[in-house]
Amino acid sequence: MSHAQIWVDADACPVAMREMLCRAASRAAIQTTFVANQPLSLPPSRHVTFTQVASGYDVADHFICQRVNEGDLVITGDIPLASDVIDKGATALNSRGELYTSENIRAKLNMRDFMETLRFSGTQTGGTAPLSATDRQNFANQLDRWISRARRPS
């Protein structure tokens, strides 16, 4: 796992998590690639890169999914992308610090589809709650755990 890298579905990645990821990438010398269809401002680092993809539905997701390798980490709130990267042997983490796993991804996909059906039928489902200090801490903890595992000699 020594060449594992981090991929960030950056269009919806909160600034606080983006900053945390950049610091961690530089500190741990782990290649981290932000992928978005809008320009991003990132601090200069030889371990952090940005790839701008064309606008369009799931373009960044497809870009990441085509390049992710077993052992990599993908930061995303997109549950179908998380499912795809898990199938490829990668780890998926959302910005609230919740790991998507082969054990919980089916239930999350089902809930996502259910909520989407409600929204399409006109039901107001409310938005996502703002990130809390606990969310930020959970994210930092999961990121640190992954980096520790990634840096262990194979």
Image (cartoon, grey):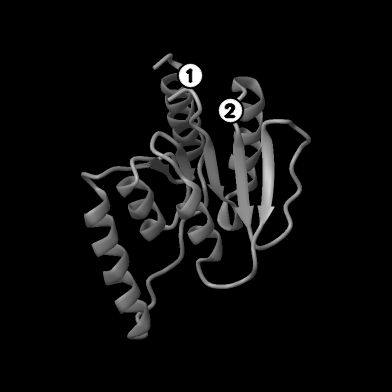
In the rendering, at what x and y percent does residue 109 appear?
28, 60
Mark on residue 30?
2
Q: Give amino acid for label 2.
A: Ile
Residue furthest to the bottom: 121
Q: Which is more toward the observer, 97 or 69?
A: 69
Judging by the rendered image, the residue that carries numbered circle 1 is 151
In the rendering, at what x and y percent does residue 102 appear?
24, 45
Left or right, 108 with respect to 67, comes to left
State the image quarter where residue 36 is shown: bottom right
Question: Please, is residue 85 above or below residue 19 in the view?
Answer: below
Q: Give amino acid for label 1.
A: Arg
Quadrant where the N terminus sits is top left
Is the residue marked by circle 1 packed among few (<14), some (14-19), or many (20+) residues within 10 Å?
A: some
In the rendering, at what x and y percent does residue 31 appear?
60, 33
Report if the CB atoms under discs 2 and 1 are less than 8 Å apart.
yes
Per the image, label 2 sits on a secondary structure element best described as: loop
**Residue depicted at 43% across the width and 41% down the height:** 69
**Residue depicted at 63% across the width and 42% down the height:** 18
